Amino acid sequence: MSLSLQFLGTGTSVGVPQIGCRCPACTSADPRDRRRRTGVYVRSGKTAFLVDTPPELREACIELGISKVDAVVVTHAHMDHIAGFDDVRRFNTLNGGAVLKCYAAPETVAAMRQVFPYITTKANTQGLFRPMIDFTPVTRAFRIGCVKVTPLPVEHGGPRTNGYLFEAEGRRIAYISDCISIPARTMAKIRDVDVMVVDCLRERAHPTHMNLELSRAALAAARARRGYLVHMSHSVVHAEFSKLLPRHVRLAYDGLVVRV
């Protein structure tokens, strides 16, 4: 039984191409330079779930043929990671009207309730089609089907932000899409992972996101066997930026499937 994730999107908060931009990345003919906002789809055996619900969630699910979702996991409450959350209601229907669980840090759950106050665990009595979600605060490891999920607190210069460690049948994937630094306690949990996905906004430094130097250092500190970079801005042209990476590290791109 394998553990896999598929990238719904790999771009920063404004996506690539940016509105009204004619830079090399935004006008690139390489499909790997077209980036929806960042999120992933995790599968192992019969278990499948979303990590974050970016604005293009519906588009990504249709394009990638995603029709099975057992739960949702949220990293933090920035809009580029939650703006597509209303579209989760379609999976209520596909699951026979069942309520879906949404797991996140307590602070993130509180923010989600403010942004989506109409979401409950009950069907709307007026016949309106609304998501039915059981928001579940988590601070420790939990399970979604056959996958063990461990929250990984990281620093992102704003709201409480988690990465997550996914484990199934001895396989381990660490997913940290947004951060400027990884605390020592978190790093200790992910050392020697099979795959590590980590934030890499661009080559230049940024106050709340890792740049290339920090991303490479984090992958080295974790001793990750394979690394994938996400949350990239239009400063990253896939073919050129890839030349700056060691052999075991690659740029992710929308639709890419990584299996362990």
Image (spheres, rainbow, N blue to C red):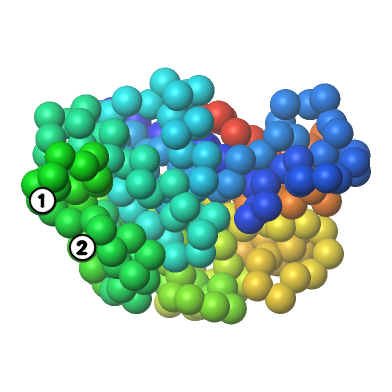
Q: Position of residue 126 (x, y in %)?
A: 13, 45
As measured in the structure, the alpha-carbon distance from the residue carrying label 1 to the one carrying label 2 is 15 Å
Identify which residue is drawn at 68% across, 65% down. 210
On the image, the x and y values in percent for residue 172 come to 39, 47
Image x and y of residue 36, in percent:
61, 40
Is mark 1 in CB contact (under 8 Å) with mark 2? no
Quick check: 172 left or right of 233?
left
**Is residue 196 shown to the viewer in this render?**
no
Q: Could you tell me the amino acid type at mark 1?
A: Lys
Residue denoted by label 1: 122
Badge 2 marks a residue whose secondary structure is strand
Q: Quadrant of the N terminus?
A: top left
Q: Which residue is mark 2?
A: 136
Q: Quadrant of residue 5?
A: top left
In primary-sequence order, the first of circles 1 and 2 is: 1
Q: Position of residue 256 (x, y in %)?
A: 56, 30
Q: Is residue 60 above or below residue 125?
A: above
Q: Is residue 18 left or right of residue 12?
A: right
Q: Amino acid at mark 2?
A: Thr
In the rendered image, the residue lying farthest to the front is: 126
Residue at 47%, 52% (x, y): give it. 83
Residue 90 in which image quadrant: top left
Secondary-structure class at tag 1: loop
Of the pair 93 and 45, the residue shown nearer to us: 93
